[in-house]
Image (tube, rainbow, N blue to C red):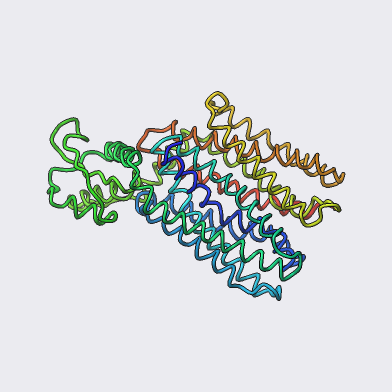
Amino acid sequence: MDAAYLCFLLLGTGALLPWNALITAADYWESVFPGRHTDRLLTVSYLPVNLATVSAMVCLHGAVRPRLRIQAGLSGFTLALAAVTLMNHSSGAAAALAALLALVAACGACDGLASGALYGEAAVLSSRYTQALATGNSLSGIAVSLLRLGTKATLPDSPDGLRRSANLYFCISAAACLGCVLLYSWVLPRLPGVRRRREAALAAALLRYGPLPDALPPSEYGEVAEEAGEAVPKIRHPDAMDGGQGQQAVLDAEQPAVNGSTVTLHRRQQQQAGEAAPLLGEAQRSSVALLRRMWHLALANGLVFIVTLSIFPGVLAEDLHSPQLGSWYPILLLTAYNCADAAGKTASGWQPLRLRDDQAILAAAAARALFIPAFRLAAVSRAGVPAVLLLTAALGSSNGFVCACAMIRAPSTVPPAAAGLAGNLMVLSLVLGLCLGAAASFLWLLLPA
């Protein structure tokens, strides 16, 4: 495991940590807002905002720098989780619940900013880093579940103890998100392997947009690159982009691959020629073209999360009960799901196991619909703890494995310069599946107990 792989693993953990932190505190929210179906309210507050933000970022692909998106998203996570600890939930008033849901929506927007950019950057660097992000996402669930178990077990089982344990839990989660900001901003850009891969990816991106014009003086390259990012070392590659015809391209070694700098260079080129720069239209056309190539994978990704979110976390937290385990039961089920999800995503990193056929991945995603009647049967028959744990583990492991296979496969089906946009589109399909699954979870409330 190289340093870059570890960084992407930790960033994947941080990117989903706020979402997991919020939903894993199901026992606390139920005690503070009894009978409000808080777990489902958190989901519908988070996901529509997340979907709108991801959709906007896909439409504006190339106009907003990935580095800015990731830093803003991770910083927003830190502030939102810290704010949760400052709120007074003790009264259970509607105002407190509304404030909580507003913070959850802010986390959804931050997730929409950061996740697509992270997967886009990983896609153009290496499939290993995409797998690292996916595995990190699932490890986030395990880390949060263990943290919640630890904070709940170390403090008294009383209303005051529950509040203190929740505040400690959210403080640690906020500190972890802050650590991810520092990791992305200061550590990752300085790793030699990442710098080399970013240079190569930027070269491929410039090939996609065409060579830079002779009309652009070399003295302006630095200025244009400054507009697109921070003042970091620039690497000039004479003859790198145009088959040896003498034009130069500036490759920014510390900026995320295929980012705004490439588009800014060409936007400047178009403006000097008196032409409009139809970035939005170009991004939309590129998105449609890529979706035609990888629609099996995008559909599979959406189906995976429609099934999962129709069950997790609502059914696990509200519809399955154990008199022996009491309030510990939903926490144990959520932990079992997260551990199995991590195992599935880790297994996708083993080449002999990974699904590589688009139709096979889509078929596996569709077959997971059988989990819905299975969990309904478990709820109405009051299935025992071992059977429910086994079913939950199957739900989690299949979610992790099929999702990771689809995310890893998608960038390899498109040209290298389009891999970043492919990563963003796969995140969009994922979030769309999450939203539809969350809406479907409310249908359980219409079923007889």
Q: Residue 392 appears at what percent x and percent y?
A: 72, 42
Quadrant in the rendering for residue 166: bottom right
Q: Residue 285 appears at what percent x and percent y?
A: 39, 43
- Front residue of 274/402: it is 402
- Front residue of 327/203: it is 327
Count of numbered labels shown in the rendering: 0
- Front residue of 247/163: it is 163
In the displayed image of the protein, which residue is found farthest to the front?
154
Give the residue at x 73% y 49%: 332
84 on left or right of 222: right
Q: Residue 338 appears at what percent x and percent y?
A: 64, 45
In the displayed image of the protein, which residue is found farthest to the top?
352
Q: Residue 28 appears at what percent x and percent y?
A: 70, 63
378 on left or right of 270: right
163 on left or right of 15: right
Give the residue at x 49% y 40%: 132
